[in-house]
Amino acid sequence: MASNPTVWGIHMGAHVSDRPIDDGYVAIGWTAMGDLRKISSNRDAFKAALVVAYPDKKAGAIPVDAGTMFKFLHEIEAGDIVVYPSKYDRMVNIGRVKGEAVYVEGDSDEYPNRQKVEWLGHFPRDRFSQAALHEIGSFVTLFRVRRYANEFLSKVDLATVPSADTIPDAQDDLTDDDTATVSAALQAEVSTSDFVIKRLMSELSGHQFEEFMAHLLECMGYTARVTSKSGDGGVDVIAHMDPLGFQPPIVKVQCKRTTGQTPRPDVDQLLGTLGDGEYVSHPVR
């Protein structure tokens, strides 16, 4: 029986939006390093080049960053699977590496070093166990997914045999205490967010979610009310800073308890309710 493919996790900044998905790639930054393909294929060469490009970098962070760049260029292989949890839309994207590294001069996102990817599927975070989300919540840029690799592979029909390899990868490169501390703090923040969203999805009815959003707006200083269900044009909550509701800005909110993408007709319906000085909000996650 064939073994499962190697599964990698990778993080990119929220500012990259949907470009990696549309253009079929994952990428890393370190723009001052230039084209990483020009560096000799050993870790020491990457460390030396990193010191030259970033002379103020802390000594403990050098092996972390150099190891990430080396693995991205020389350990990821064609046919490997990559899991990319995108921050801007909270989706988990799973793809197959094509084995073609490219360098994009002047990349607007400052992620010029890319590996081309064939995307196989895009899934809301609530489709995965909290333990699996925790594993890909590592704030190391690039890492092996080991413990829950099969859970991600099964989503794209690639899981074949249970993995006996449950030894954590590196985090083997987390030699810098500050890096490890920041990683743990950020991971806790994401895990808490996932927990809250799952509770909202599983324990509130649609009307209770609308009441929750109205209360949240009130906590932000607005006066808010849930609309009646007839003839609301898709508006579920109306909020305003003026207690009487006469002065702009007036915020119209449509509430949908879903972690997927909102259909365009729903957005257009909400936009069609706007008058002068009115704004929309669309809390769906």
Image: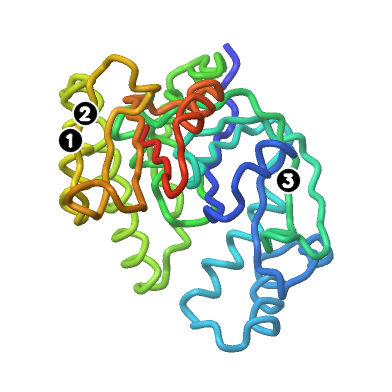
Q: CA distance from mark 3 to mark 1?
A: 42 Å
Circles 1, 2 touching at the beta carbon (< 8 Å): yes
Q: Label 1 is placed on what type of residue?
A: Phe
Residue carrying label 3: 115
Classify residue 185 by image quadrant.
bottom left
User: Is 62 placed above or below 174 here?
Assistant: below
* Location of the N terminus (image quadrant): top right
Name the one closer to the observer, 10 or 223.
223
Q: Dot 1, crowdedness within 10 Å: few (<14), some or many (≥20)? A: some
In what element is the residue under mark 1? Answer: helix
Nearest to viewer (mark 3 / mark 1): 1
Q: Label 2 is placed on what type of residue?
A: Phe
Q: Residue at x 29, y 39 (%)?
A: 194
Q: Label 3 is placed on what type of residue?
A: Gln
N-terminal of the pair, mark 2 or mark 3, is 3
Q: CA distance from mark 2 to mark 3?
A: 41 Å
| Colouring mode (rainbow / by chain / secondary structure / one colour) | rainbow
In what element is the residue under mark 3? Answer: strand
Residue carrying label 1: 212
Label placed on residue 209: 2
